[in-house]
Image (spheres, rainbow, N blue to C red):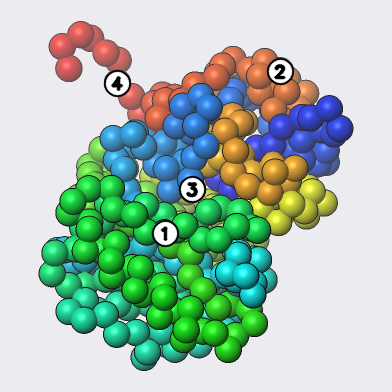
């Protein structure tokens, strides 16, 4: 399963989608010999986060398995979330002189700079009987972990998801999170003071509060040894939460090399993640998103040569460069190999996928079709 993060876009009156604009001869060849459709990662009209979008692709209902971004971030960092701990994803951001968000990602700051910010905060924060730990991830991303008595995870995000406004306040969603909200309010006030000398990377935006979760493993659900090959820690975290083995590689090209290795090593299911299309979409950079899609297409022959019964190409959500954010638009999917039908379509893009034999369906309906095409679902006889 090749997941091109943020793959989907949409056609507007002014221009076509990035996938339509991209030159994708290899994907188009597969389109003629495979089945296409459109996925609503969670449901129609719902804009998914990356975690929820991936859960659906792997057959876990995001509305049942509600897992905050902090849990995935902790798993990626190899940080144990103890009983009563509260974790959240932290974006190191930049506030302007008026306290408004000027840049949600602090110019996509370096990991080294983020390490300095985290070290400053860990050394300077004082929160009474609650301990706060900040662990840098990659670039502007970090993990916040709170440990102390009477903490609850039901707190609203402080990230407004846009610039030009002040950050939101951490608000408790139930009585059990009242103390957490107070601790976070004080933490953020101290953060503002401790980082006040910095022109960039001077505040934290927090989202995805949660605590330890029990989730059935991918192997237990599907009877397959699964390996994730990823370039960013977040997606390593998703894999680990689901009990997949995980390899982190520097680039998609390195990931294709690893794909050959893990298939030769007996993996039943390989999840290959590519992040650059999403990054470009979030930056509002149409040309960069087109280039990222075209890079995937150039590597497709090497992906196919690795073997495997079935190839799936899709995304976890839409990130159109027109909006520079995740949106609700459905995501193209291509299913090739095994007993997947050949739709005979000439392109792989949103328009062609609308005409494909798979139709439009929710994310959790993908895995049964993938397993069926690979001959891994037994005939239903009404008794088992």
* Of residues 94 and 360, the one drawn nearer to the viewer in this rendering: 94
Graded by Cα atoms within 10 Å as few (under 14), some (14 to 19) or many (20 or more), the crowding at tag 1 reads some
Where residue 78 appears, as percent x and y from the top left, is: 32, 70
Sequence order check: which comes first, mark 2 or mark 1?
1
Q: How many numbered callouts?
A: 4
Mark nearer the N terminus (1 vs 4)? 1
The residues bearing labels 4 and 3 have C-alpha atoms spaced at a distance of 31 Å
Residue marked by disc 1: 169
Packing grade of label 4 (10 A; few <14, some 14-19, many >=20) is few
- Which mark, residue 50? 3
Q: Position of residue 89 (x, y in %)?
A: 42, 63
Tell me where residue 348 appears, x and y as whole percent.
Answer: 71, 30
The residue shown at (59%, 29%) is 330
Whether residue 267 is visible, yes or no, is no
| Image quadrant in which the C terminus is located | top left
Give the farthest residue toward the top.
382
Cα separation, mark 2 vs mark 4, equals 28 Å
Q: Earlier in the sequence, mark 2 or mark 3?
A: 3
User: Which residue position holds label 4?
Assistant: 378
Q: Is disc 1 placed on a helix, strand or loop?
A: loop
- The quarter holding residue 326 reads top right
């Amino acid at each position: 399963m090749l997941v091109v993060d943020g793959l989907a876009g949409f056609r507007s009156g002014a221009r076509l989608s990035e996938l339509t604009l991209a030159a994708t001869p290899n994907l188009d060849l597969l389109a003629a010999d495979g089945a296409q459709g459109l996925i609503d990662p969670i449901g129609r009209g719902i804009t998914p986060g990356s975690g929820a979008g991936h859960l659906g692709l792997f057959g876990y209902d995001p509305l049942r398995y509600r897992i905050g971004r902090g849990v995935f971030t902790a798993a990626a960092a190899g940080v144990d979330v103890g009983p009563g701990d509260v974790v959240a994803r932290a974006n190191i951001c930049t506030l302007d002189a008026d306290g408004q968000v000027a840049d949600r990602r602090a110019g996509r700051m370096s990991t080294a700079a983020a390490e300095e910010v985290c070290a400053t905060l860990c050394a300077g924060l004082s929160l009474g009987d609650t301990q706060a730990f900040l662990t840098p991830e990659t670039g502007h991303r970090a993990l916040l972990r709170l440990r102390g008595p009477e903490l609850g995870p039901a707190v609203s995000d402080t990230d407004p998801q846009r610039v030009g406004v002040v950050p939101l306040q951490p608000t408790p969603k139930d009585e059990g999170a009242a103390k957490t909200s107070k601790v976070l309010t004080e933490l953020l006030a101290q953060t503002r003071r401790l980082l006040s000398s910095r022109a960039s990377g001077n505040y934290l935006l927090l989202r995805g509060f949660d605590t330890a979760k029990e989730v059935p493993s991918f192997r237990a659900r599907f009877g397959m040894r699964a390996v994730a090959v990823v370039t960013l820690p977040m997606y390593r975290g998703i894999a680990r939460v689901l009990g997949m083995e995980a390899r982190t590689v520097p680039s998609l090209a390195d990931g294709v090399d690893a794909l050959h290795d893990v298939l030769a090593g007996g993996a039943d299911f390989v999840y290959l993640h590519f992040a650059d299309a999403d990054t470009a979409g979030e930056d509002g950079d149409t040309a960069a998103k087109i280039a990222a899609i075209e890079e995937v297409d150039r590597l497709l022959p090497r992906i196919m040569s690795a073997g495997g019964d079935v190839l799936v190409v899709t995304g976890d959500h839409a990130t159109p460069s027109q909006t520079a954010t995740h949106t609700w638009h459905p995501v193209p999917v291509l299913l090739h190999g095994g007993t997947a039908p050949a739709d005979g379509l000439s392109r792989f893009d949103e328009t062609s996928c609308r005409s494909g034999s798979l139709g439009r369906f929710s994310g959790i309906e993908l895995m049964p079709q993938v397993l069926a095409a690979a001959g891994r679902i037994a005939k239903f006889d009404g008794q088992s």
